[in-house]
Amino acid sequence: MQPAFSIVKTLVPIAGSDQGFPVRRIFCVARNYAEHAKEMGGTGREAPFFFTKPADAVLPAPIGGEGAMSYPPKTADLHHEIELVVALGLGGRNIAAEDAGRHIYGYAVGLDMTRRDLQAELKKLGRPWDVAKGFDQSAPIGPIHRATAVGPLERGAIRLEVNGVERQRGDLADMIWSVPEIVAILSEYFELQAGDLLFTGTPAGVGPVQRGDRLVGSVDGIGQLSVRIV
């Protein structure tokens, strides 16, 4: 019997449009806010540390609606991490930080959901984080807002509430590595392409969520992301 193959491109809604943004790869920056770096055991302006998620880990929330994320198996400690997401419309290698802006298509509010108990065990063993970070629906994301409409996001509040109670709050200006720097450094390791998403790190205050919890994250200038854990 021949296997049945189907290629489905992950699409993220684009604000103000009936089109979707086709996702190619997802790159994530760890420990990019000083206070979060401290709570995770880091110190100072360490060199940026990257990890990836598969494109089909994306869970797009409908424009003006709420996404539903299934609580994943094999964990008893699922954590939230609110992040600014950068969507690339133009790729390249060795991109200069001062040129990074022209490669950015837009921005979105995203969540880097983490099986924290598995991650802690993998760290102890010196093993990769894939099962802790790259599981199904581990990257909820709101609509992408075009950079031409919102401008470069260099500062502004980023926050997350769980069941109406604030858990995380920071400012984009507090990033250890700015968005242009992230694009530039990442392009030294990979040839970036249109369709890549960059999760840019989370402020302090990460913590556990349970089934039934409602997460509402926001970044000034690009609205909210609402997700229910089911």
Image: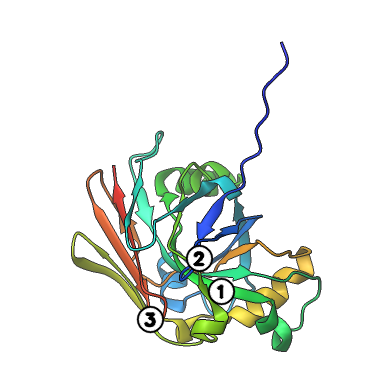
Q: Are marks 1 and 2 in contact (CB under 8 Å)?
A: yes
Viewer-side residue, 84 vs 30: 84
Residue at position x 46%, y 78% in the image: 34
Q: What residue type is labelled 1?
A: Gly
Residue at position x 42%, y 76% in the image: 222
Q: Which of the 4 image quadrants contains residue 86?
A: bottom right
Q: Name the residue under label 3.
A: 220
- SS at mark 3 in the image: loop
| Residue 210, position as x, y percentages in the image | 26, 46
Res. 14 mark: 2
Q: What residue type is labelled 2?
A: Ile
Q: In front of the other: label 3 or label 1?
A: 1
207 sits left or right of 82 in the view? left
Asked if residue 180 is positioned above or below residue 121 in the image, the reply reads: below
Mark 3 neighbour class, 10 Å CA radius: few under 14, some 14 to 19, many 20 or more = some
Precedes in sequence: disc 1 or disc 2: 2
Q: Which residue lies furthest to the right in this view?
A: 93
- According to the image, what is the colour scheme of the structure? rainbow
Q: In front of the other: label 3 or label 2?
A: 2
Q: Name the residue under label 1.
A: 106
| Residue 166, position as x, y percentages in the image | 23, 69
- SS at mark 2 in the image: loop
Residue at position x 71%, y 89% in the image: 98
Asked if residue 10 is positioned above or below residue 65 in the image, the reply reads: above
Quadrant assignment for the N terminus: top right
CA distance for labels 1 and 2: 9 Å
- SS at mark 1 in the image: strand
Q: In front of the other: label 1 or label 2?
A: 2
Res. 5 mark: none
